[in-house]
Amino acid sequence: MYEAVVFDFDGVLAHPTLGSVLDAAARKALQAVGVEPTPRAVSHARSSDLGRVRLLCAAHGLDPARFMTARDECTSAEQARAIADGRKPTYDDLDALGALNDQGVATAIVSNNQQATIDRFLDLVDLGADLSVAYGREPSLDGLRRKKPRPYYLRRALADLGVGAGETLYVGDQTKDLLAARAAGADAAFVRRSHREGYRVGARPDYEVRTLHNLP
């Protein structure tokens, strides 16, 4: 049995954020820094790719750190509204987390989403579990550099839990989740939710499941 099971957030605990929500956040962030929210600018502004963020900032003479602060604040606020009003619902198998706790297994979250988004999710949603650790990324350029597939936040979570990587299962729905788990030395489970039908996994998971109830 694993000592800890760590979960990704988007696509694992909650449905992926709608594009319309991310677009609205990008438009508000651009307006906050004085840039016209053209379709091209919105596309770059909502991206979590550091290269695209730098291109946007260079094109408009923006300070990347200032823009990222505005972008992440707007994105977290829009996602919090989507969680609260049902546009970003949870999945119906989250009781699996409480069942793991009942077996003495620690549970945690490590996500590329903003820390503020994760915190708001936990304020609004009763997971029926005692989450020992919940990491989102920092609202900064460093946060973008450290996101998965890099194992930075997963390693921090394991250190906080006091659990070895070899005693940990990381649960995600994308290749980058599996790569982060592998880099940290943890096992990985791929959850093939409905939005991942036909998705080609770019790394071999230790397990593939369709529901959290099937986790080992």
Image: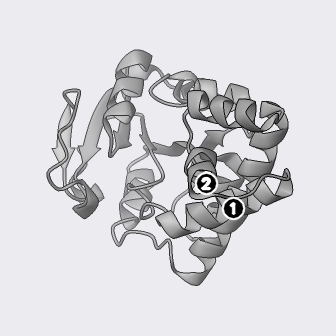
Please tell me how crowded label 2 is: few (under 14), some (14-19), or many (20+) other residues with Cα within 10 Å: many
Q: How is the image coloured?
A: one colour
- Which image quadrant: the N terminus? top left
- On screen, 22 above or below 132? below
The residue tagged 2 is: 42
Mark 2 and mark 1: Cα distance apart in space = 6 Å
Residue at the bottom extreme of this rendering? 85
Q: In which quarter of the image is residue 162?
A: top right
Residue 41 position in % (x across, y down): 63, 49
Residue type, numbered disc 2: Val
Depth order, front residue of 170/111: 111
Give the residue drawn at x 36%, y 42%. Answer: 171
- On screen, 118 above or below 67? below
200 lies left or right of 71: left
The residue tagged 1 is: 27
- On screen, 143 above or below 155? below
Please tell me how crowded label 1 is: few (under 14), some (14-19), or many (20+) other residues with Cα within 10 Å: many
Q: Is mark 1 on a helix, strand or loop?
A: helix
Kindly indicate whether the residue at mark 1 contacts the one at mark 2 (C-beta within 8 angstroms): yes
